[in-house]
Structures are given as C-alpha cells and as structure tokens.
Amino acid sequence: MDFRGRMLESLSEVLVRGPDDSIVAEGWMDFVNTSEAADSEPKLFWLFLTLVEDGKAKRMKEDALLPGHLWESMTEAEKRHVAATESKWLDRDPKVQAWRRKQQLTNG
C-alpha cells in the first residue's frame, strides 16, 4: 500500500526493547484500510503479540484476525469499506463476515 509516498507492508518480527535493551514485546504488525480518501490513514494493530515481563513471555494475541476493539471502534462506513475491499479480512475474519451477512439481510 502506498502511504505518504512510501510503501507500507505488514511487518513480521517486530521487537520492542526496553531502556536496558531487553525485549519487552514482540509480534507482527498489520494494518487495515478503512477508507479510500486520500487523507485516510490505515489503522495499525498487532496481528500477533507477546509481552515479556520478568523474563516470562505471555502471548496476548494469537489469532490472525482484526482485534475486537479495533473492529468495534470503526464507524459503519469504515466497516462497509473493509467488508467490500479488504478481501483478506472478509475471507478469514468471522467479525467481518458476520457484519457483512447482517448488512446483506438488512438491506435485502
């Protein structure tokens, strides 16, 4: 995706380090486009996320789906755009699929 004149792609193995250079989080980042407007910014999120505290890793997000809080924060117009144009989410995310089915039933 072209964003602000640069290519934006999903990232794997993103590491977040603390002041002592220890890893405090790791995971994969992804994004979803919610509009075709020129000034629209993609919504970034952790696709997978593991936090490390006191040397112990805790998986916080393990599914390859849009986070529930992100989906719930989207406007109806943004959800409509995702369901219509973001096939990777429509193909695999039950939240997007259920929303689209509901819209199809509601709108005939």
Image (tube, helix red, strand yellow):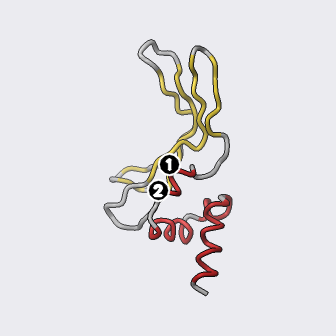
Q: Judge whether 23 appears above or below 2 on screen.
A: above
Circle 1: element type: loop
The answer to which of 61 and 102 lies nearer the viewer is 102
How dense is the environment of label 2, judged by Cα within 10 Å: few (below 14), some, or many (20 and up)? few
Residue 74: x, y in percent? Answer: 46, 60
Residue 95: x, y in percent? Answer: 63, 60
**Where on the picture, by quarter, is residue 97?**
bottom right
Residue 24: x, y in percent? Answer: 52, 23
Circle 2: element type: helix
How dense is the environment of label 1, judged by Cα within 10 Å: few (below 14), some, or many (20 and up)? few
Q: Judge whether 61 appears above or below 26 on screen.
A: below
Q: Nearer the viewer, mark 1 or mark 2?
A: 2
Give the residue type that dot 1 points to.
Answer: Glu
Q: Residue 64 carries which label?
A: none
User: 97 left or right of 85?
Assistant: right
Q: Name the residue under label 2.
A: 73
Number of callouts in the render? Answer: 2
The answer to which of 49 and 9 lies nearer the viewer is 49
N-term mark: 1 or 2: 1
Q: Name the residue under label 1.
A: 9
Q: Distance between the residues labelled 1 and 2?
A: 23 Å
**Where on the picture, by quarter, is residue 96?**
bottom right
Residue 12: x, y in percent? Answer: 57, 38
Give the residue type that dot 2 points to.
Answer: Ser
Quadrant where the C terminus lies? bottom right
Residue occupying the point 36% across, 67% down? 37
Residue occupying the point 57% across, 27% down? 51
